[in-house]
Every structure is written in structure tokens, then in C-alpha cells.
């Protein structure tokens, strides 16, 4: 796998336990991924059961799973903290609640191999029946909310909150001293 990009997978968490463990287990069970590290990002509100799950994952996977504390508030702050700590050549942003499917990461990596300096994102809206556990009302509300976010933010993204993305680390490198390396508009 040395020819594959090394991945730093960032997963912020607050109160996920079983889904966090399943996300990490699924990632490491994918043989096509060259995972450098999984960074689990915790904050002030992270629950003790979640912290215990993080310690268990660290014990199971060793140095390949690290838990770090976010230094800025909100979801965007968690991702910024993870990006600053990332050691891989590419970064994958995911969620711990299985809304971002860990089995999609290999497809993101394949797309990034074709377009190595692009930002690659996934969307549950591009393929029919991609939402699991959503009733009709929740599905309609999610669709309306996604369209509203796209309109307000003036982005063509179709899935703002189930979003998972892969970024090449060199696209996030600093260009000027004192200027932030990136902006994340998820919080």
C-alpha cells in the first residue's frame, strides 16, 4: 500500500460509542485503505462512555488511533484541530454516528487518485435509497434543509451534514504566515 496516499481520518465525537467503534472497525477492515492514523477529536461535552470507547480503540489499534482534544469550539473547530494534528498525505473528514458511511472511503481515495489535488466529497442524495433509517418526514425535511443550505451558502453541495470529504494535505498548507491554512464551513 505504500503507493497509496496515507490517510489521516478525522472523526469528531461527543456521545457516540457503538457507532464510533463500528466506524473505526469498518475503516481498518478495508484492505484498500492505507490508514496512517485515525484521529478521534473530543471536546468539553464529550461523554465519559465515549471517552472510554476512545481509550478502548486506542488499546485495540495502538498508535494508529489517537484521541485529541479540540482547541476551537464547534464542529468546525474540531475539524481544524484534527487537520493541525494530521500526519497523513490526505485527510478524510467523517462523523462518528455512521451518517458518513466508512465503506465509501475507498471510493473517495480512488477518485482522489484520478484528481490528486481536488477536494472530493460524498453525498447521500446522488444515489436513490442512500438514506438508511430515515422515515418519509425526516427525508423530506432533510432535503428541504439541504436545499436551503445550498441556497444560503451559494454552494452546489447536495449533502452538507452527512458530508464526508477527502482533502489532499498539500492543498491545506500555509501560504502566508499568520493566515489560516483553511476554512471549514460546517459549524
Image: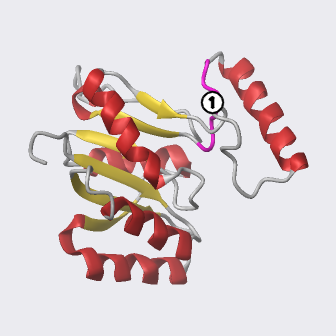
| Residue 35 seen from this side | yes
Type of colouring: secondary structure
Residue 166 pos. (x, y %): 38, 36
Residue closer to the observer: 48 or 112: 112
| Residue at the image position 35 percent from the left and 44 percent from the top | 106
Residue 134 pos. (x, y %): 78, 53
Residue closer to the observer: 131 or 40: 131
Quarter of the figure with the C terminus: top right
Q: Disc 1 marks which residue?
A: 126
| Rendering quarter of residue 133 | bottom right
Residue 149 pos. (x, y %): 72, 28
| Residue at the image position 59 percent from the left and 71 percent from the top | 15
Q: Residues within 10 Å of mark 1 (few under 14, many from 20)?
A: few
From the viewer's perspective, is 122 left or right of 56? right
Q: Residue furthest left?
A: 2
Image position of 90 with respect to 136: above or below: above
| Rendering quarter of residue 157 | top right
Residue 42 pos. (x, y %): 45, 65
Residue closer to the observer: 76 or 6: 6
| Residue at the image position 69 percent from the left and 23 percent from the top | 150
From the viewer's perspective, is 137 left or right of 10? right
What type of secondary structure mainly makes up the magenta span? loop
Q: How many numbered discs?
A: 1
Helix, strand or loop for disc 1? loop
> Start and end of the magenta stretch?
156-162
Q: Residue furthest right?
A: 137
Image position of 117 with respect to 77: above or below: above
Residue closer to the observer: 103 or 46: 103
Residue 73 magenta-drawn? no
Amino acid at each position: 500500500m505504500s503507493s497509496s496516499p496515507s490517510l489521516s481520518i478525522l472523526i469528531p465525537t461527543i456521545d457516540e460509542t457503538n457507532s464510533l467503534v463500528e466506524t473505526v472497525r469498518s475503516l481498518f477492515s478495508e484492505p484498500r485503505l492505507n490508514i496512517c492514523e485515525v484521529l478521534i477529536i473530543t471536546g468539553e461535552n464529550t461523554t465519559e462512555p465515549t471517552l472510554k470507547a476512545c481509550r478502548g480503540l486506542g488499546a485495540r489499534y495502538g498508535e494508529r488511533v489517537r484521541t485529541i482534544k479540540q482547541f476551537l469550539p464547534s464542529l468546525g473547530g474540531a475539524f481544524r484541530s484534527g487537520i493541525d494534528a494530521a500526519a497523513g498525505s490526505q485527510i478524510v473528514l467523517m462523523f462518528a454516528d455512521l451518517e458518513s458511511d466508512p465503506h465509501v472511503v475507498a471510493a473517495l481515495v480512488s477518485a482522489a487518485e484520478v484528481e490528486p489535488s481536488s477536494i472530493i466529497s460524498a453525498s447521500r442524495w446522488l444515489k436513490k435509497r442512500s438514506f438508511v433509517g430515515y422515515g418519509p418526514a425526516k427525508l423530506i425535511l432533510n432535503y428541504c434543509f439541504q436545499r436551503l443550505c445550498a441556497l444560503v451558502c451559494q454552494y452546489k453541495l447536495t449533502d452538507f451534514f452527512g458530508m464526508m470529504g477527502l482533502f489532499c494535505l498539500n492543498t491545506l498548507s500555509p501560504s502566508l504566515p499568520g493566515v489560516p491554512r483553511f476554512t471549514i464551513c460546517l459549524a
